[in-house]
Image (cartoon, rainbow, N blue to C red):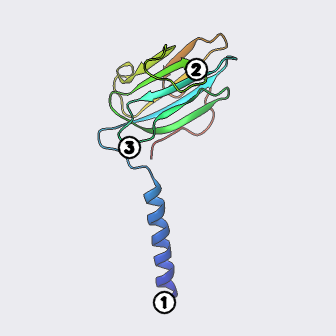
Amino acid sequence: MRSVAGAMLAFVALAGALASCQARPAGSVALSLYHRNLSDQPFAYRVIGTPPESEEWTGLVPDVVSSAGCGFVGPEWELIVTEGPEPPDPADDIAARAGAGDFEERDPVAIALTIAADGSIDITDGIPEWWDSDIQRCP
């Protein structure tokens, strides 16, 4: 009887772990985003085009090497960056932008957002040379 109870408990734990994983929405693109801000001014970013019922990607570009991780976006996604600490809106003055077409509509795609010390913005393809942690991969 103990082995059946133990097996049931293991099954429930496994089912809970699998249920907590983010399922990939149909027609979505796996996007990994790496970022850093070397300037003394705040910049915020937003990824537009997340699938319905998915959490939007918004945040401040941190002043340390960091990653927003990997998530799923629609095939026509766009990254917008604005000056200031407020979450960007497409109607704001956009300091920089990049989208699916800039990266040949690849899936998966990894991009790096770097704010230089002078406030200039660079959005590049791939895992940046300054990234020294585990590669961000989608589930």
The residue mark sitting in front, 1 or 3, is 3
Residue 139 versus residue 119 in the image, above or below:
below
Nearer to the camera, 41 or 21: 41
Viewed as shown, does residue 40 lie left or right of 15? right
Q: CA–CA distance between discs 1 and 2?
A: 58 Å
Furthest-left residue in view?
27
Please tell me which residue is depicted at 47% across the width and 63% down the height of the picture.
16
Viewed as shown, does residue 66 lie left or right of 28? right
Q: Residues within 10 Å of mark 3 (few under 14, many from 20)?
A: few
Asked where in the image residue 18 lies, by quadrant, the reply is bottom left
Q: Residues within 10 Å of mark 1 (few under 14, many from 20)?
A: few
Viewed as shown, does residue 71 lie left or right of 26? right
Earlier in the chain: of badge 1 and badge 3, it is 1
Determine whether label 2 and label 3 are within 8 Å by CB.
Answer: no
Furthest-right residue in view?
40
Earlier in the chain: of badge 2 and badge 3, it is 3
Please tell me which residue is depicted at 37% across the width and 45% down the height of the picture.
24
Q: Amino acid at mark 3?
A: Glu
Please, what secondary structure does the residue beneath circle 2 have? strand
Q: Amino acid at mark 1?
A: Met
Question: For mark 1, what is the residue?
Answer: 1
Q: CA–CA distance between discs 1 and 3?
A: 42 Å
Question: For mark 2, what is the residue?
Answer: 114
Please, what secondary structure does the residue beneath circle 3 have? loop
Q: Residues within 10 Å of mark 2 (few under 14, many from 20)?
A: many
Q: CA–CA distance between discs 2 and 3?
A: 29 Å
Question: For mark 3, what is the residue?
Answer: 53
Give coordinates of residue 4: x percent, y percent. Answer: 46, 84
Give coordinates of residue 130: x percent, y percent. Answer: 62, 26
Please, what secondary structure does the residue beneath circle 1 have? loop
